[in-house]
């Protein structure tokens, strides 16, 4: 099965990225092994949401992505290899082929060394190491991007979710060859 985008991690960063890529019509797979730190959170500082439990936020995020056609796979990604123009994302239960890969792995940068993405010390409280990526989310490996906590942004759901959306928009824009915007209007 071949995808436009494979996203590793379905916390706020990954699921938000998946919601954008899938809604843009990009074939999207999200691989997650259910280790989100957000599942321990009680959130009262997410704009537009008065209060919500972390587990509910994560579940709603995954459902939103699935609503637009993202395929969710519960498994651990163990490697990402490039063959020709595409990446093979190897998981414990199978391999998924994709043109672009977004690393939204939260506090885990376990994949870095194996897949050739460099890391750097984290700047945020309790975040030891993050993937090295530019302000667009691009790592030094063309086609591999990083978003959210794993990319070193401030560890708050509104920011990690926003960063996932930002990186997804950059990936969609690259796939389309022009800047992308997703604006719905009130149905009249
Ligand atoms: C106790 C606690 C309380 C918090 N309270 C708040 C709060 O009140 N307000 C607030 O804004 N923020 C809060 N946060 C922070 C918030 O949870 C994070 O900012 C944010 O949600 C992190 O999102 P993320 O998507 O980057 O990472 P995560 O939510 O951790 O998601 C990363 C996902 O990647 C998956 N993954 C990693 N490696 C792999 C792999 N190799 N294969 C497959 N899947 C993989 C994990 O299973 C996980 O689901 C709190 C955090 C904690 C721990």
Image (cartoon, rainbow, N blue to C red):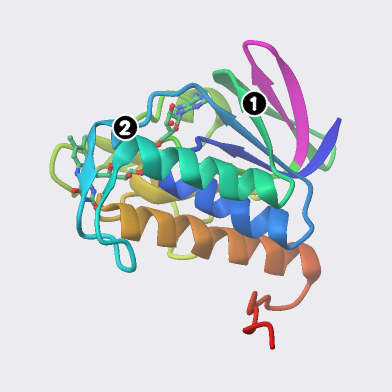
Residue at x 65% of width, y 50% of height: 142
| Quadrant in which residue 94 is drawn | top right
The prevailing secondary structure element of the residues shown in magenta is strand
In the rendered image, the vertical position of residue 54 relative to residue 184, given as above or below: above
Quadrant in which the N terminus is drawn: top right
Check the image and name the residue furthest to the left: 125
Residue at x 51% of width, y 53% of height: 16
Check the image and name the residue furthest to the front: 188
- In-front residue for pair 18/148: 18
Q: Is residue 186 left or right of residue 15?
A: right
Quadrant in which the C terminus is drawn: bottom right
Q: Which residue is mark 2?
A: 39
Q: Residue 73: which numbered mark, if any? A: 1
Q: Position of residue 177 (x, y in %)?
A: 78, 72
| Quadrant in which residue 141 is drawn | top right
> Magenta span covers which residues?
88-98
Badge 1 density bin: few <14, some 14–19, many ≥20, Cα 10 Å: some
In reply to whether residue 95 is colored magenta, the answer given is: yes
Q: Residue 83: which numbered mark, if any? A: none
Confirm or deny contact between disc 2 and disc 1 (CB under 8 A). no
User: Would residue 151 be seen by someone viewing this image from the given angle?
Assistant: yes
* Quadrant of the image where one finds ligand 1: top left
Mark 2 Cβ and ligand 1 under 8 Å apart? yes
Say which element carries label 1: strand
CA–CA distance in space, label 2 to label 1: 18 Å
Check the image and name the residue furthest to the top: 92
């Amino acid at each position: 099965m071949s995808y436009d985008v494979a996203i590793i991690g379905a916390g706020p960063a990954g699921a938000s990225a998946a919601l954008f890529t899938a809604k843009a019509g990009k074939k999207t797979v999200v691989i997650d092994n259910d280790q989100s730190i957000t599942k321990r959170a009680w959130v009262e500082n997410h704009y537009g949401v008065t209060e919500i439990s972390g587990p509910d936020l994560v579940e709603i995020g995954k459902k939103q992505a699935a609503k637009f056609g993202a395929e969710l796979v519960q498994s651990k990604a163990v490697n990402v290899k490039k063959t020709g123009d595409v990446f093979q994302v190897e998981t414990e239960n199978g391999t998924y082929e994709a043109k672009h890969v977004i690393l939204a792995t939260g506090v885990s940068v376990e994949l870095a060394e194996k897949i050739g993405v460099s890391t750097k010390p984290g700047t945020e409280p309790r975040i030891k190491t993050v993937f090295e990526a530019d302000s667009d989310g691009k790592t030094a490996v063309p086609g591999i991007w990083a978003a959210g906590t794993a990319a070193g942004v401030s560890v708050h759901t509104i920011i990690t979710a926003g960063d996932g959306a930002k990186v997804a928009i950059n990936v969609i824009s690259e796939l389309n060859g022009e800047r992308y915007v997703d604006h719905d209007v009130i149905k009249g």
